[in-house]
Amino acid sequence: MVFERKHILGLEELSSDEIRLILDTAESMKEVSERDVKKVPALKGVTVVNLFFEPSTRTRASFEIAEKRLSADVLNFTPTESSVVKGETLLDTARNLEAMGASVIVIRHAMSGAPWLLARELSSSIVNAGDGFHEHPSQALLDLFTVREVKKEISGLKIVIVGDVSHSRVARSNIWGFIKLGAEVRVVGPPTMIPRDIEKVDVRVYYDIEDALEGVDVVMMLRLQKERQESGLLPSLREYSRFYGLTRERLRLAKEDVIVMHPGPINRGVELSSEVADDVHSVILNQVSNGIAVRMAMLYLVASSGGNA
Amino acid sequence: MKILVKGGQLVDPSQEINEIRTLYIEDGKIKSYPRGTKELEKDPSIKVIDASGKIVSPGFIDLHVHLREPGFEHKETIRTGCMAAAAGGFTSVVCMPNTNPVNDNASVTEYILLKARTEGVVNVFPVGAITKGQKGEELSEIGEMWEAGCIAISDDGRPVMNSRVMRHAMEYAKAFGLPVISHAEDLYLSSGGVMNEGFTSTMLGLRGIPNASEEVMVARDITLAELTKTHLHIAHVSTAGAVRLMREAKKRGVKVTAEATPHHFTLTDKAVLSYDTNAKVNPPIRSKEDMEAIKEGLNEGIIDIIATDHAPHTEDEKKVEFDLAPFGISGLETALPLALKLVEDGILTLTELIRKLTFNPAQIIKSDRGTLKLGAPADVVIFDPNKTIKVDREKFRSKGKNTPFHGWQLSGQILYTVVGGHIVFPT
Amino acid sequence: MKSKVIMDSETITRALSRIAHEILERNKGAKELRIIGIRRRGIHLARRLVDKIQELAGIKPPLGTLDITLYRDDFRRRTDWPSVQKTEIPFSVEDKNVILVDDVLYTGRTTRAAIEAIMDYGRPASIQLAVLVDRGGHRELPIQADYMGIKVMTIRTQKVDVLLKELDGRDEAIVLQLDSPNEAG
């Protein structure tokens, strides 16, 4: 099949075929990363701008490496250093970049919906690197890729997402991705952190982590951000880790070949005990190398769709 | 000016009239209902309007408009806001005090009235702020504002969070016979919210404002109104729960009235999908159940009036990230066609609809307008309920083009708006 | 569409056998050979060559598969993109004699892309090209076939299709008359 989208804004709007195409393309891209000359000329002459309004060394580095492996010309634009501090709007900033010849803009922004605003108003291709609490498609795609690599087939797997689901764009994108590829998805966390009406998308809600872990194939831990405690959603981090932290004993409730994932960076002792983090079940480091292959696939498909649709 | 409005269907709920009748206006008042018109038609000083096939009703009265002047003239001025009102069939508008400076004292009230007299083509009735600076702490000089011409008090845009302050405001307002208009929102529950809390907000990753935020304050204000025996008017009702609370309060005999906006009885929160800031409004557009409950409330008479909450903003202000966009819909020029859909769908009869746009609002602010009885000020609107129009925001007279209805095909076109016997629309 | 068979099953088998002999002759044996098939049909032809060489010389040269989609030069002009398939070159090409295998040599652009791809894997001693059908007269780049099954003169409104047992159930090379040169792809 042919990829016809001009933008990749989120997994909610992608079909399961499109998701599979991205994952299959990432397989070939992974091979490029494994040989000595880690470069192909596919995006030669294409200018890609990394427009990151939120600090993020990992995701941005991953995108940057992916772009360079495709031979693209890369521009990193971090608005704290620039005119946005002087009050320039998001649209004006992006329009300037478009005028400089940016064919693809990879945007990370603290507010949900920012990529949609750009997609509506600009002619460049937009790739969402994370918007507010809304979606983080490249993270979910690399999670899907990693799970598929280990488990061969996603359909029929039991996945549980643990933690602050309501403020997590990683959780939302993963929920869409795993459901579309046929997995059974569960969420567990304190009730103050489970988003309203999430059951409507066919996700089972749990408040007890032990019930939620029963028989699962994949455990996806979310980062707990300290600000959540400060805004009254949790009484203390200690209580959170007592009731929702992943320990070796709790992990035994899952299937024997369970894999544990985390988008990083890990709060050792809060979401995961140190031993679990180092555990052989964990594929956390694999996720990092797969991230580059998946991002190469996303950029390649979006740039090659010829700016159609 | 002398105007003869011939052969239209006169719908005047204040007099229970709904029949073909000719209207004659002279000296700014409704002079008579002439039977034979041949003599009058021969008089060259009389402007004759042929209203056959059209509706002739009292000019609409909008109890909730933001004219933005003083302080926010880039969004709207009294002049442009009144032009928009006239284009929408409104002959009177009630303007909210969240200007800059806030209308919390007589001089700002006088400024607004002066501007309205010299530049406004429709009648303007100012609402005074309940508290100084709308900070919710100290009462403003309500008596002086009443004397200067305010017809109600409200901190609209914000609630009065402190219940004791709200109680005192309600008691104090009784001395001047002023209704207290409540913007019902619990700021702690709504904190950070930018749209209705529900499945759509979960999907879009946006913070939601739960129904409870409005209902908690509606319940509180009804309770205080009962305690203080004041007239309470609930602005822009948006939830099924609020309608339920109002129904129960009215049954008990509490002196409370309520309004609903066209966007709340026409849209659901799906209107913000794809992050359309034109549908970002406070209180937010809510679920289908809430929308249906508001329509039921209108049908049962629990919701007494329709008001637009006209809230213009500039295009630049709205073309930003959803979280950053200001709340508001520019509603004066789409109100009638959207309201007529209620008649089309059998929710209201035409007479009932017009009552909610004319007589009922007039009663709330104790105005002698909203009627076409002989001797009343000649505030009249003539419209064609069947003419299809396509909403085009570029053609709005308002500076605010922020509407989620752009491009919609609707029925209902304003043909003439007359204020005090002068035709103010079309210009 | 009118069509003409230019190679039947027997002819193809004989041609591949002859090519295998020529490769062994020119490269003085099979030791430094590395055979790389260009997706899709080149891979099956490459496999057959590997088997034939093993039969003739007793040595089985390593086989790789190459997808050149990421090296194409018409990147932004096409609207119908074939999806990227896997490239697998499980050996070093350093100082080896690489034989690229494809079904049809037409403009030479596919070969150019394949050469660029191989160079990203290392520095071969030589890169040689083996094709089943060489469409003479259409070269757009200075590329030649070192080994060919058959050379035909064609015009732009014709297309050459190679059918293979492994994919299409039979071995055949056909020249098709198209309605317009654009179908020639």
Image: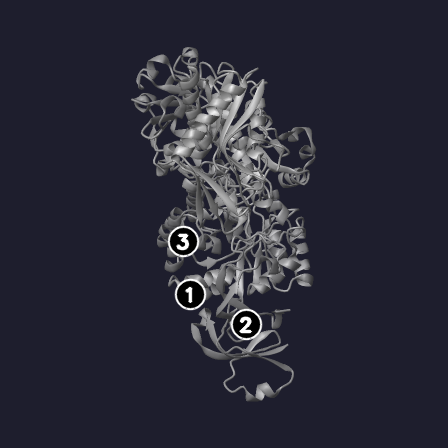
Query: Residue A46's spot in the image, x, y percent?
Result: 62, 34
Discs 1 and 3 share one subunit: yes
For badge 2, the amino acid type reads Ala
Report how far apart the C-alphas of labels 3 and 2 lie in the structure.
32 Å
Q: Residue furthest top?
A: A275
Residue at point 44%, 64% (across, down)? B353
Residue at point 44%, 74% (across, down)? B17
Q: Earlier in the sequence, mark 3 or mark 2?
A: 3
- Disc 3 crowd rating (10 Å Cα; few below 14, some 14-19, many 20+) is many
For badge 3, the amino acid type reads Ile
Query: A89 or B219, which is in the foreground?
Result: A89
Q: Earlier in the sequence, mark 1 or mark 2?
A: 1
Residue under numbered circle 3: B294
Residue at point 38%, 61% (across, down)? B347
For badge 1, the amino acid type reads Glu
Can I make out residue B138 in this image? no
Can I make out residue B119 in this image? yes
Query: A79 or C123, which is in the foreground?
Result: C123
Give yes or no for contact between labels 1 and 2 (Cβ–Cβ under 8 Å). Answer: no
